[in-house]
Image: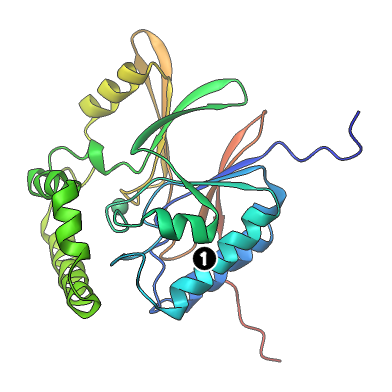
Amino acid sequence: MPFYTPMKKTLMIADLHLSEDRPDITALFFDFLQTSASQAQVLYILGDLFEYWIGDDDPSPFIAQVAFELKKLANLGIKIYFIHGNRDFLLGKKFAKKSGMILLPEHYCIELYGQQVLIMHGDTLCTLDVEYQNFRQKSRKKWWQWMILSLPLFVRRKIANDARQRSEMNGKSKSVEITDVTQLDVEKQMLNHQVSLLIHGHTHRPATHEFTLNGTNAKRIVLGDWYTQGSVLEITPDQMILKNRPFMTINDK
Ligand SMILES: [Mn+2]
């Protein structure tokens, strides 16, 4: 028997939307990396780790610090996997290497303690949002990304800021149905990958949905965003728990 057996624990997070404007989220994330994450075997980040991403060549010290903290965790032997979100889809190999993350394809099947699980960001399931899906299709093309990434950084930053403002306006005008997943696409993806468990983020509507798929029990777990607290899915061989982490209080006395 080995002297030390690492805890069989896998963590999943999504939609942190890290940015310089929200030091409270960043502090909570770094604390999470140094505490719970360092006790786990694997950490999956299912997209929108960053509020926006303008290219791996962004020299921002804030981004360098996030890379440094992730790399510290990776150096402890914890595997960190990353699936792109709709905000940070331009995150590339250079940053992944710097931060010790392994990039995964947009839809990916993993084996979790004996169970096949499909993981993704979740934006591809929101098919009623035709305007977004059209943009998504275009922006995942090599030529489009090459074109954007060849622009000077200050231009890319302006494009990202405009897109953030547009998205905020859209979020207010688009209905709840349009910005949520469609059950039909959930089932299509799950049948395609032959799984009875799907885990994703993106909609910021943390929940566990149970339904029947092809006569068997199926489950969809939605991770929460980090705007008002942290949200972590903890998976061990025995259970899966969606946990909240409150923002840290500052003790100034
Ligand atoms: Mn998203």
Tell me residue 32's x, y (percent). Answer: 61, 61
Residue situated in front as seen by the camera: 138 or 183: 138
Quarter of the view holding residue 159:
bottom left
How many residues crowd mark 1 within 10 Å: few (<14), some (14–19), many (20+)? some
Tell me residue 170's x, y (percent). Answer: 13, 60
The residue at the point 37 percent across, 46 percent down is 201
Q: Is residue 115 visible?
A: yes
The residue at the point 91 percent across, 28 percent down is 1
Amino acid type for the residue under numbered disc 1: Ala
Tell me residue 168's x, y (percent). Answer: 19, 66
In this picture the colour scheme is: rainbow
Residue situated in front as seen by the camera: 11 or 60: 60
Q: Secondary structure at mark 1?
A: helix
State the residue position of label 1.
Answer: 67
Quarter of the view holding residue 246:
bottom right
Query: Among all residues in the image, which is located at the extreme top?
Result: 215
Q: Is residue 166 left or right of residue 153?
A: left
Q: Is residue 187 left or right of residue 4?
A: left
Query: Among all residues in the image, which is located at the extreme bottom?
Result: 253
The residue at the point 20 percent across, 72 percent down is 156
Residue situated in front as seen by the camera: 57 or 103: 57
